[in-house]
Amino acid sequence: MILSGVFAPIPTPFDEDDRVDTRRLRAALERWVAGPLAGFVVLGSNGEAVFLDDFEADRVVVAAREAIPRGRPFIVGTGRESTQAAVRATKRAAEHGADFVLVRTPGFFKNQMTTEAFVRHYTAVADASPVPVLLYNFTALTGVNLLPAAVHQLATHPNIVGMKESGGDIAQIAELVSGTPDNFHVLAGTLSTFYAALSVGCAGGILAPASVVPHACVRLFELTREGRRDEARALQQQLAPVARILGATYGVPGLKAALNLAGIDVGVPRPPLAPVPDAAVAAIRDALAAFEDTFNEPASR
C-alpha cells in the first residue's frame, strides 16, 4: 500500500452529551471517501485523541474501518506517553483494521526525551506492531523534537515505513528525506509549507484542511509533482489564509467550524476546548470563500 498523496486527519465527532458520535463519523466519511483523498487518519491531534479513553478510541477505529474502503490507507493514531501503552493501543488498532499506525512522540518528561529514548520507544513499538508504523513529530504540541539523527536510525527498522513531520522547518524536512531510504515516506503535516516540503522530497501530506478543501490540496500536490511550479506556488499562496486560520489561529475548533460550514456535521470540540466565537466563524467563512466549490468539484485545470 503506497503512502503518497494527500491524507486527511479526521476530527472525532461528539454529540450534545459529549459522547463519541459514530453516526456522525460514518456520515462524514461517506462524503470524504467520495473525494480525491489518498487516505485517512483517525485519532491524531486533529481527532482530539488525547481526550479519548481506550474504549472510545476503539469505537472510533471500528466505525471508521467500516466506512473506509479497503485499498485506501487507513491510519490510526496510537501515540501514548508510555511505551507499553503505545504497544497496547497499536495492537488494538491493528486488531480493529488499521493499515498503519501513527505514533506521536511522548513528551511529558521532556528533558529525558533524547534520541536514545526515542529510538528505544519506537523500536519497541515497531517490534510489537502487527502493522507498519509511522513516526509522528509535532513539536508545537509535544514540546519535543524527533531529530533527524533518531529518524535516520529508526528508518532502518523493517516495520517503520515513514513519518509525519508537522513542523515547518524545511531544512529539517530536507534532512529527514535525504537521510532515509527511498521506501521511507516522509509526509508533511503543515499546509502552509506543503509546496516547499514536496519540493524537498516529501511523499505527500497529512493536512487538516484537506478534510475541508480536499480538491485544492490534492491539486497542489499534483501541480508540484508535475513540475508546474508557478501554478503550484500560486495555489500555495491562495491556500495560505486557510492554512493559517485552520492551523495556528483556531486549531481543532476552527476545523470543526469549517467542516460544519461545508455541510459536514462533526459536532463541537470536546471540553476543555470550546467552539469558536461567531466572529471566528465569519473569518473562517471568508477564508473558505475562494474554495467553496472545491469540496464537491475538482479544482479547474
Image: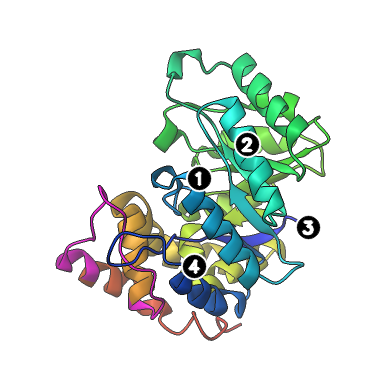
Residue 54 bears which disc, if any? Answer: 1
From the viewer's perspective, is the residue at label 1 or at label 3 nearer? 1
Residue drawn where x is 59% and y is 34% of the image: 86
| Mark with earlier residue (2, 1) | 1
From the viewer's perspective, is the residue at label 3 or at label 2 nearer? 2
Disc 4 is placed on an element classified as helix
Q: Main secondary structure of the magenta part?
A: loop
Vertical comparison of 120 with 194: above or below: above
Q: In the rendered structure, are the residues bearing label 3 and label 2 in contact, judged by CB atoms less than 8 Å apart?
A: no
Q: Which residues are magenta?
A: 261-281
Where's residue 17, x and y in %?
A: 28, 63
- The residue carrying mark 2 is 88
Q: How is the image coloured?
A: rainbow
From the viewer's perspective, is the residue at label 4 or at label 2 nearer? 2
- Quadrant in the rendering for residue 298: bottom right
From the viewer's perspective, is the residue at label 4 or at label 1 nearer? 1
Where's residue 32, x and y in %?
A: 55, 74
How far apart, in angstroms, are the residues tagged by discs 1 and 3? 28 Å
How far apart, in angstroms, are the residues tagged by discs 4 and 1? 25 Å
Residue 211 bears which disc, if any? Answer: 4
Asked whether residue 278 is in view, the answer is yes
Mark 2, residues whose alpha carbon is within 10 Å: few (<14), some, or many (≥20)? some
Residue 131 bears which disc, if any? Answer: none
Q: Nearer the viewer, residue 192 or 40?
A: 40
Number of residue marks: 4
